[in-house]
Image: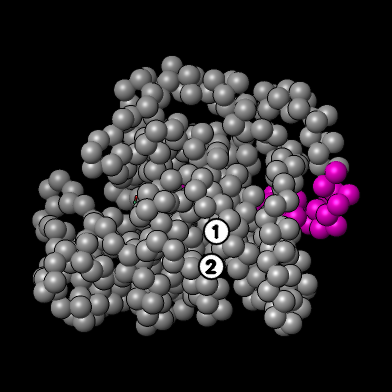
């Protein structure tokens, strides 16, 4: 679906109002132009498994017009990207989305300016006909044959990624134990390390490996890559192509994620992000829906830490959403998530770093809080809208999605009972 004509008409109808709001910000924020340029450059990858309705172990209530094929998933991302110009990448999960014809998939994505972000392996589910079971783990498994199968799967995923022009492998392991005594922690860790080393050896020269950690679930007593310390340990032992990946939902409640981010960046070991939000556990809710201030504080550390290392904000970390939508339209939810990410990024760019530095040096705690909250409480939405306007997107992506009844069009094309692959 090509939307440029409709986007133009939509923007025309909102333009006057937008210009008034943007001009007000431009007059009051000296860095406004710089922030708009940075927002234009910033792209957030959409996971192929989040384009359909998600479920829980209690059920799944699929919505109409879900993408039934990888091609349709790419078209969904293309639709998002046309609307917000900030979703120019897709992250595939193998084998949920095996690109059987990589050349045609690649040219379809190219046509819409979509690139392939990290590819994800899956050794947390058994696939039909698989020789070995992952019931008791994969890369950590006590049986070498299981480890070998999981290693080969990861190498296969790298091959798929190469064919699509990706350059990153994300490894998330469900490995761990459900009961005390089930596992020897040291042996599980060493098996995992040895397996990851074999996968690492198969990485092309310009590739990265991201090691994602998670506190618990599906294992409930121990997780072998359970926190950033364990991930960092593995990434350090693996080498300079290995990094830690932070998924916001993978921490115990109240964990200070911003501090983790700051230190990983300091060590040059932060590789990427999975954005979502949560109230209790790995709830996979819309980014910024529950704790927007925490999201801002995380971005504040990201901007500070990336600037300290002179990193390109848009290019050097893998930014991705990892959410699941049980009760919302997935595309609407993803539009909200991308907006929340960019909003937190813009607010973090607003922070007066010099004044914050002085406040910290003088132990002026009140001033430091004022500086952060000044930025957080500034309505940056007109900056985001201006970035979209300049890059050909819609002033109000969610508004046009609803006005044009885009889900209805997708349902007419695909049917009511399509179900997307994923969890
Ligand atoms: C695990 O909870 C996770 O965050 C990993 O990134 C997986 O790849 C993804 O979710 C699967 O939904
Ligand atoms: Mn994740």
Q: Which residue is at 73% across, 58% downward?
A: 374
Going 11% across and 74% down the picture, which residue do you hit?
A: 181
Q: Which x, y percent locates residue 225?
A: 31, 70
SS at mark 1? helix
- Mark 1–mark 2 Cα distance, whole angstroms, equals 8 Å
Q: Which residues are magenta?
A: 24-46
Q: Is mark 2 within 8 Å of ligand 2?
A: no
Q: State which quarter of the image contains the C terminus.
A: top left
Q: Which one is in front, 296 or 184? A: 296
Q: Is residue 229 magenta?
A: no
| Visual colour scheme | one colour
Within-10-Å neighbours for mark 1: few <14, some 14–19, many 20+: some
Q: Quadrant of residue 198?
A: bottom left
| Residue for badge 2 | 258
Left or right of residue 356, residue 147 in this image: left
Nearer to me, 345 or 374: 374
Task: Indicate the secondary structure of the residue bearing disc 2.
Answer: helix
29 relative position to 379: left or right? right
In x, y percent, where is residue 360? 70, 78
Residue 36 drawn in magenta: yes
Q: Earlier in the sequence, mark 1 or mark 2?
A: 2
Query: Taking 388 as reference, is 183 left or right?
Result: left
Residue bearing the label numbered 1: 294
């Amino acid at each position: 679906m090509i939307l440029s004509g409709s986007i133009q008409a939509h923007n025309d109808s909102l333009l006057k109002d937008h210009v008034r709001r943007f001009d007000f910000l431009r007059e009051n924020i000296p860095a406004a132009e710089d922030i708009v340029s940075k927002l234009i450059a910033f792209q957030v990858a959409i996971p192929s498994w989040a384009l359909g309705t998600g479920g829980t172990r209690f059920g799944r209530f699929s919505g109409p017009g879900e993408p039934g094929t990888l091609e349709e998933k790419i078209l969904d991302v293309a639709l998002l990207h046309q609307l917000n110009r900030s979703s120019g990448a897709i992250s595939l999960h193998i084998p949920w989305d095996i690109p059987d014809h990589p050349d045609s998939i690649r040219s379809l994505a190219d046509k819409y300016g979509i690139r392939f972000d990290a590819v994800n392996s899956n050794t947390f589910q058994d696939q039909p006909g698989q020789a070995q079971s992952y019931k008791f783990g994969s890369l950590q498994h006590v049986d070498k044959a299981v480890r070998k199968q999981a290693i080969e799967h990861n190498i296969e995923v790298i091959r798929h990624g190469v064919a699509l022009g990706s350059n990153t492998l994300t490894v998330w392991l469900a490995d761990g134990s459900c009961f005390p005594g089930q596992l020897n922690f040291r042996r599980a860790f060493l098996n995992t390390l040895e397996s990851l080393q074999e996968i690492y050896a198969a990485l092309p020269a310009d590739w990265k490996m991201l090691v994602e950690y998670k506190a618990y679930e599906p294992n409930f007593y121990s997780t072998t890559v359970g926190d950033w310390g364990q991930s960092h340990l593995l990434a350090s032992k693996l080498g300079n192509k290995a990094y830690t990946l932070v998924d916001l939902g993978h921490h115990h409640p109240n964990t200070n994620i911003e501090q983790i981010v700051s230190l990983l960046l300091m060590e040059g070991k932060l590789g990427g992000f999975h954005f979502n939000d949560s109230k209790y556990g790995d709830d996979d809710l819309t980014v910024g829906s529950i704790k927007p201030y925490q999201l801002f504080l995380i971005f504040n550390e990201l901007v500070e830490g990336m600037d300290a290392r002179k990193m390109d904000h848009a290019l050097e970390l893998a930014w991705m959403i990892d959410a699941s939508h049980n009760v919302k339209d997935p595309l609407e939810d993803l539009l909200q998530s991308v907006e929340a990410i960019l909003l937190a990024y813009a607010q973090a760019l607003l922070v007066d770093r010099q004044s914050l530095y002085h406040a910290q040096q003088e132990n002026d705690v009140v001033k430091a809080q004022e500086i952060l909250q000044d930025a957080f409480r500034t309505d940056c939405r007109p900056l985001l809208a201006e970035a979209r306007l300049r890059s050909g997107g819609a002033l109000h992506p969610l508004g046009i999605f609803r006005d044009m009844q885009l889900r209805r069009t997708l349902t007419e094309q695909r049917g009511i009972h399509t179900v997307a692959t994923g969890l």
